[in-house]
Image: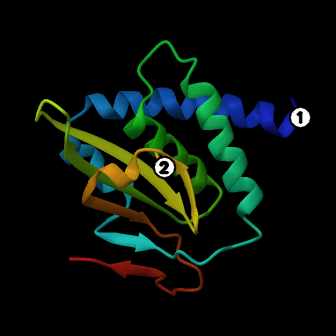
């Protein structure tokens, strides 16, 4: 493994642990740290960030399978969002719901930055989006988000 990936893996481990702690708190306390509610970051492709996005996604997926705590969709989405925020890269966290085969309500979360889904993409199409949190990094005072609602 290349040195930069080793550092990303360690960072992913730390953020996954931190995100798991956040998941245990009341959501109303955590939500403000997730970004602007019902705002989305741009879908515009940023070729300069593509390698970083893919590496962060790879690190989150590698580590989340090996933590001794639960590191499922919301935890991975929050951890990846925080890793991108540290790099000043915009992202959007989506939360969705659907019913399973027995009629029980289930939830899912996923994270997108530009045109790349970093976490949760494999299941996202099965869910109806009920909340969106855009982490928009302001550049030169320009708002780059789309508000829904």
Q: Quadrant of the N terminus?
A: top right
Q: CA distance from mark 2 to mark 1?
A: 26 Å
Kindly indicate the quadrant of the structure image that contains residue 57.
Answer: top right
The picture places residue 105, in percent across and down from the top left corner, at 14, 38
Residue at the right extreme of this rendering:
2
- Nearer to us in this view, 132 or 30: 132
Q: Position of residue 118 (x, y in %)?
A: 56, 50
Q: Which sits in the foreground, 29 or 27?
A: 27
The image quarter in which residue 115 lies: bottom right
- Name the disc covering residue 2, or none: 1
Q: Is residue 93 above or below residue 7?
A: below
Where is mark 2, residue-wise?
121
- x, y (%) of residue 26? 19, 37
* Residue 11 left/right relative to 4: left
Q: Residue at x 87, y 34 (%)?
A: 3
What residue is shown at x 28% (from left), y 51% (from top)? 127
């Amino acid at each position: 493994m290349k040195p930069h990936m080793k550092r990303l893996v360690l960072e992913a481990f730390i953020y996954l642990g931190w995100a798991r702690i956040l998941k245990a708190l009341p959501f109303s306390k955590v939500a403000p740290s997730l970004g602007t509610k019902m705002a989305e970051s741009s879908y515009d492709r940023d070729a300069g960030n593509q390698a970083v996005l893919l590496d962060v996604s790879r690190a989150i997926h590698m580590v989340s399978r090996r933590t001794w705590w639960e590191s499922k969709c919301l935890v991975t989405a929050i951890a990846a969002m925080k890793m991108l925020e540290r790099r000043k890269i915009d992202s959007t966290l989506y939360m969705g719901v659907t019913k399973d085969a027995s009629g029980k309500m289930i939830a899912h979360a996923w994270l997108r930055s530009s045109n790349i889904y970093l976490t949760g993409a494999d299941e996202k199409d099965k869910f109806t989006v009920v909340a969106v949190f855009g982490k928009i990094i302001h550049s030169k005072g320009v708002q780059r988000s789309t508000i829904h609602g």
